[in-house]
Structures are given as structure tokens and as C-alpha cells.
Amino acid sequence: MRIQIINGPNLNLLGTREPEIYGKKGFEEYLNVLRNAFPNIRIDYYQSNVEGELINKIHEVGFEADGIVLNAGAYTHYSLALMDAIKCVSTPVVEVHISNVHQREEFRHHSVISPACKGVICGFGLNSYRLAIEALLHMK
Ligand code: CA2
């Protein structure tokens, strides 16, 4: 079983600012927690601040991985190109958000990628990623 986590813009800076929203942990640190929680699963991680690179990654793994956990960051709210990329591949994609976007600014309430995803998990901090992997496991 192979799961690909893809993080979008600014998520490389997790743990450095706005800890009240995003927590104090960097993603690489959390990745160890996640890998320990799922010892039998290969969990690959990719982060980019560049829209086209995120699309390339989705194309690259989207016919081989068993699932993609995608936090598209702010691209969530306006990238139709990312939405198309998710539709183009056969691997199921779970959209995740660390924060509860519905408790935040109005522009974060709408996701253009949700219709292309299997489901959405948001608001559980970094645990959102663990819950997304659980959801993908239960699809098998
Ligand atoms: O809650 C989430 O996971 C978001 O996808 C995070 C995005 C935001 O644009 C979405 O609306 C919701 C922003 C990520 C910004 O990451 C930061 C990292 C370090 C310090 C501050 C922000």
C-alpha cells in the first residue's frame, strides 16, 4: 500500500507562524509520527509552492499510488488547473485542511477541488492527515 501526501504553498513553513491556527509542529516532524502510526504503509511526501509542480506530481503518482492526501493550501480556493489534474488521474484523492476553513474568512469556505476529490477532512489539525489515510484504507 502506497500513499502520497502532497502539500501546497506555504505549508513548508508549518510550525513557524500562526501556531494558534496551524500548531507548533513542522510537517517533517509530523511525518515521523504518521509513519510510525502506519508501519505497513509506504508514505511518500512532496511539497511545492508552485502550482504546476503540484499538478506534475499528481500526474506522476496518480496512476500508481493507492491514494493521495492533498492539502492544496490556498490553491484549494481557486485552482481549476489542480481540480482538472485530480479528475485526470485514477488514484483517489482526499482533500485535507489543518484548520477548519469554515470557521475562517469567507473566501476559505469554498473549495474548487472538492468536487474532484473522494472526500474532504478539515479542522483536526495535523490529525486531518491521519484521518485521511484511515479513510483511504477503508476504501480498499
Ligand atoms: O488549513 C489548511 O490546511 C489550509 O489549507 C492552509 C492554507 C490556507 O490557505 C487554506 O485556506 C487552509 C495556508 C497554509 C499556510 O501555512 C502556513 C504555514 C506557516 C505559517 C503560516 C501559515
Image: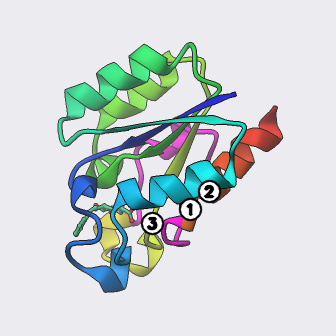
Given the image, on which type of amino acid does mark 3 rest?
Ile
The answer to which of 81 and 40 lies nearer the viewer is: 40
Three-letter amino acid code at the position of disc 2: Arg
| Mark 2 close to ligand 1, CB under 8 Å | no
Q: Do residues under tags 3 and 1 come within 8 Å of each other at their CB atoms? A: yes
| Relative to 33, residue 49 above or below | above
Instruction: State the residue at coordinates (31%, 53%).
Output: 73
Residue position marked by numbered label 1 in the rendering: 128
Residue 122 part of the magenta segment = yes
Q: Magenta residues?
A: 109-126
Which image quarter: residue 117?
top right
Q: Nearer the viewer, residue 16 or 122?
A: 16
Q: Residues within 10 Å of mark 1 (few under 14, many from 20)?
A: many
Measuring from the top left, give residue 134's x and y in whole percent.
72, 50
- The question of residue 84 being in magenta is answered with no
Q: Nearer the viewer, residue 106 or 123?
A: 123
- Residue under label 3: 98
